Amino acid sequence: MKNIENIPEELFDLFAQKSFDQLTAVEKLVVEDHMNSAEYEEYRKLVSDFQDIDNSIKVEPSEKRFTRTSESAIRKLLTYRIPVYQAAAVLLLAGFFTFGYFGTDRLDRAGGQSFDSVGTSTETIRKIKEKVINKPRTKTDDAMNVAMDTIGKSLSEDDYPRELIFNL
Amino acid sequence: MTIAQMTDEELLRSYLRKRDKEAYGQLYQRHFPALSKYIAWQVHDLERGKDLAQNIFLKLYQNPNSFDTSRNFKVWLYTVAKNRWKNELRNEAIRSKHKALVPIETTTFIPEEKAKDERLQNLNKALEALSENHKEVFVLKYTNGLTVNEIAEICDCSSGTVKSRLFYAMKQLKDQLKVTQTNS
């Protein structure tokens, strides 16, 4: 056998079409270049038997089948029941995106930030308070202190605190 | 020109442009039986072959733009089918891994009267013994009448490789049948 890759395609077609006796002189030359007549007949019988089986398998193209398949595909989609594991997976994913994205870590940090800001505010108030306390006392301060002490008390002219008497 | 005289590519273009259902129906009538049988020979199951072929046509019906208009329709169709059944077999192999000790069902799809014929029975057995690549090339050539170049495109190999596979497939089948005949 010569290089198989160079066998003319025509030879493979002839197996399916003609017996050796039916070949033309030119075709016989093509065949004999690669095999003898007995081999050719063996291959021909093989192809013919195979085609015999293949032709006996009947497949009718049916439009009904086509429509039925499309319908059944749609029905399948509409009546699709979500399996438990898929629902569980969705819940898990939702949980992951909620807690995984914001995360306890992030939540803590967000809380920490607000606690920090509370701490900072307390500190500021303390500083202001100290400033106020340590401020040199003025007459007005004294007057205010007395006023605070006497809140809720009825004042007579005698009881009237002297600090609150201003000489305008 | 009547619909029957139009080429596959013309029919599909007509369906693409005008959603011409008659043109699509013609394509379906022309290729559905052979495509089903091609897949059936590979997966040993005619019903599965029909289902897969049906599925391919359904996808094409819904999304005709999936067809590459620069290609030969028949070659495109068989390439899609080949990828589909290979995926099916791969998925089946994965599934069967999980079904330990459960044998994979193989069904014969040859009609009863042919299955009774001993020579045809032997030929079928010999075919099943061929490697996937050899069987595929043989089936494409002798059931679907594709040219060597078309088969080369479907199998993504050179035409020389197709001829070589085809020749060895036939030689192996011939030798196998001889052995069986001698034994019987």
Image (cartoon, coloured by chain):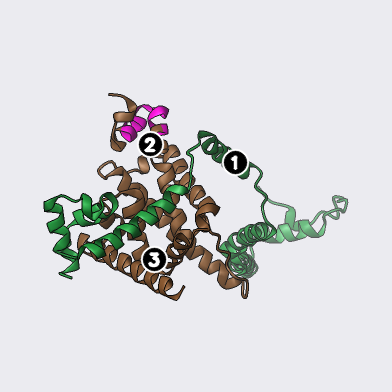
Q: Would you identify the image quadrant in which residue B30 lies?
A: top left
In whole angstroms, how far apart are the C-alphas of marks 1 and 2? 22 Å
Chain that appears green: A
Where is B150 relative to B123, above or below?
Answer: above
Name the residue carrying label 1: A72
Sequence order check: which comes first, mark 3 or mark 2? 2
Where is B88 relative to A62, above or below?
Answer: below
Q: Residue at x 42, y 29 (%)?
A: B21
The residue tagged with tag 1: helix, strand or loop? helix
Q: Main secondary structure of the magenta part?
A: helix
Region rendered in magenta: B11-25
The residue tagged with tag 3: helix, strand or loop? helix
Q: On the same chain: label 3 and label 1?
A: no
Q: Residue at x 35, y 60 (%)?
A: A46
Question: Is residue B59 rendered to the left or right of residue B138?
Answer: right
Residue B27 disc label:
2
Q: Amino acid at mark 2?
A: Leu
Chain that appears brown: B
Question: Is residue A166 rendered to the left or right of residue B159?
Answer: right
Dot 3 crowding, Cα within 10 Å, few <14, some 14–19, many 20+: few
Instruction: Report the mark closest to the observer, 3 or 1.
Output: 3
Instruction: Report the mark closest to the observer, 1 or 2.
Output: 2
Name the residue carrying label 3: B132
Q: Residue at x 37, y 30 (%)?
A: B23
In whole angstroms, how far apart are the C-alphas of marks 3 and 2? 28 Å
The residue tagged with tag 2: helix, strand or loop? helix
Q: Amino acid at mark 3?
A: Glu
Which one is nearer the viewer's eye here, B138 or B111? B111
Chain of the residue on which disc 2 is drawn: B
- Please give the count of numbered marks on the rendered protein: 3
Which one is nearer the viewer's eye here, A3 or B83? A3
Dot 2 crowding, Cα within 10 Å, few <14, some 14–19, many 20+: many
